[in-house]
Amino acid sequence: MFLKYLYITKNGKTLRKIDFKKGVNLIVDTTPESKIKETGNNVGKTTVLRLVDYCLGSSGKDIYQGIEFKNTDTNVEQFLINNSVEISLCLTTSLEDDNAKEIILKRNFLQRKQKIASINGENYPNIKKDYNIELNKLIFGIKADKPTFRQIVSRFIRNDALKMNNIIKYLHTSTKDTVYETIFLYMFGVKGKNELLSEKQIIDEQLKSEKNYLNRISGKQPATTIEQVLKTLQNDISELNDNKKKFNVSPKYQEEFEKLKFIKEKINLISSKLSEKQMRLNLMQENINDLKENISTVDNEALKTMYSETKSFIPELQKKFEDAVKFHNSLIRNKLKFVSKDIPAIQNEVVKLKEQLNAELQNEEKIGSKLSNSGSLSDYELLVEELNAKFEKKGQFEEKLEQIKSLEKSIKEKAERLSEINEEIDKSEPELKDNISLFNEYFSYYSKQLYNEEFVLSHYVDKDIYKLRIDNLDANTGDGKKKVQIAAFDLAYIAFTKAIGLKSLNFEMHDRIEGIHSHQLSTLFELVNSDKFNGQYIVSVLKDKFDNDKLKKYLEENKRLELSQNDKLFRIENG
């Protein structure tokens, strides 16, 4: 599929219309190099690539959000939302044939019912589950779950530093080797293996998850260790059960135990009341003793002196000293009588409480003897507690053992299935070798033309996973050379897919190729525009980098869009 056009509309009116052609397509930033630092160079040339990517299922956040620091340009974001900006992308099987099959994609930046994500007029608002899956079928002919559309299409749109610096591993750094294996085998034409590769990827992920979970629950203890622990626990339980049988517990143990519990509660209540009554009796007795002592130890001389002194002030005092003593003793006796009158009743209560206590103690002893013919009840209760704890621990270990065995069985089955899948995939290795050999014909040709070096792609198997490598690559390659290598790879891949008839995209999009030397850049454009190459090379560039007549001519002949500080992509400043 070729890229035919990209339209940008604002409130239903055309804001930008970019038509693409075969060969080189340049998105040009005319900002002078001396002004780039001053202006920030945000005219939107890279955004064109990101809008194409958005129509091809990306989240679109990179259109208004910085990749490195995730800072959001709220002006752009609000502009896209508030002005109902819509992006239309047309893919076609041919740029020369007016009757060629087309795929028209439309997306906006609104949400919910206002969201547009359409393919040929049919809306697919769920991007991951519907939109991208449908595109995977239409563009790449992939009906399996893996590789996903985004995993494949991301290589065709190198719109960030990661993709522009990694020929093979162009996805996020956390991407697993099994994911790349699925992508690589699809890329290089291994037929009929997508379902198997998809299954392999899923099983591999499940295996890692199950192995991690197994390590967590087992604490790195094998099942055999837990089995020995269970045997020890079972021996302990058997021994405790034997001890329990010696108690000859009545079948009505629980009923008897409840009775005993009730009796103990009564005993506690009676004992409390008895203690209270006895304390009261003791206080009363102490009071009586104090009163009796007052009668026997009255200081007659002191009373007589007090009486004499009083009479000197009150001559008419009628009472004699003896009368005062008599009155004092009378008061004490009355107090004694008052205090003593409740003692018999309290003593009777104490007697009754003691009788009740004795009766309940006898009942306690009687029921206790019913519950156990040997050993004390407390011993029995401790034994039952210990037995229950052992059973609980045994249950926990049994559950853990069951989980471990289940996981080990599942891991074994998945490992066996992986082995079967790998054997089946290995049958395609001759096909893979042949296809990589064909690819290398194009790859070595383009790399030799661009840099006078021949690069070779090869495959190898590491831990049952197919991997790719490129030889004759210098690890310290400069930015310009690395971009030439990527260009050679991408051009070779378009030629390769056409040669084997693989459904694919016929365009490559690159960002920031200014590091390429002018000689290599001229050669690159010549190769892309030649009749031998039947594809598109869409790239964003700075005009200042086209500093010789040959490059300036290429610029004028191949530019598709020209942007500047006064005419940025969305024309926000112009209203």
Image: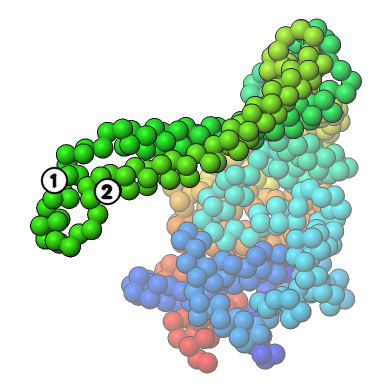
- Is 428 displayed left or right of 206 in the figure? right
At mark 1, the secondary structure is: helix
- Is 474 displayed left or right of 150 in the figure? left
Residue at coordinates 56% horizontally, 83% vertically from top-left?
A: 79
As displayed, is residue 304 above or below residue 152? above
The 10 Å Cα crowd at callout 2, few under 14, some 14 to 19, many 20 or more, is: some
Where in the figure is residue 488, as x and y percent of width and height?
Answer: 60, 50
As displayed, is residue 282 above or below residue 568? above
The 10 Å Cα crowd at callout 1, few under 14, some 14 to 19, many 20 or more, is: few
Residue at coordinates 82% horizontally, 16% vertically from top-left?
A: 370
Residue 211 appears in which quarter of the rendering? top right
Q: Nearer the viewer, residue 393 or 574?
A: 393
Residue at coordinates 71% horizontally, 36% vertically from top-left?
A: 209
Q: Is residue 211 visible?
A: no
As displayed, is residue 203 above or below residue 326? above
Image quarter in which the N terminus is found: bottom right
Residue 25 appears in which quarter of the rendering? bottom right
Mark 1 residue type: Thr
Mark 2 residue type: Ala
Q: Measure the C-alpha gap from mark 1 to mark 2.
A: 12 Å
- Residue for badge 1: 305
- Is 288 displayed left or right of 342 in the figure? left
Q: Nearer the viewer, residue 323 or 132?
A: 323
Earlier sequence position, callout 1 versus callout 2: 1
- Residue for badge 2: 324
At mark 2, the secondary structure is: helix
- Describe the colour scheme in one phrase: rainbow
Where in the figure is residue 571, as x and y percent of width and height?
Answer: 53, 86
Badge number at residue 318: none
Give the tally of numbered discs: 2
Where in the figure is residue 376, as x and y percent of width and height?
Answer: 71, 13
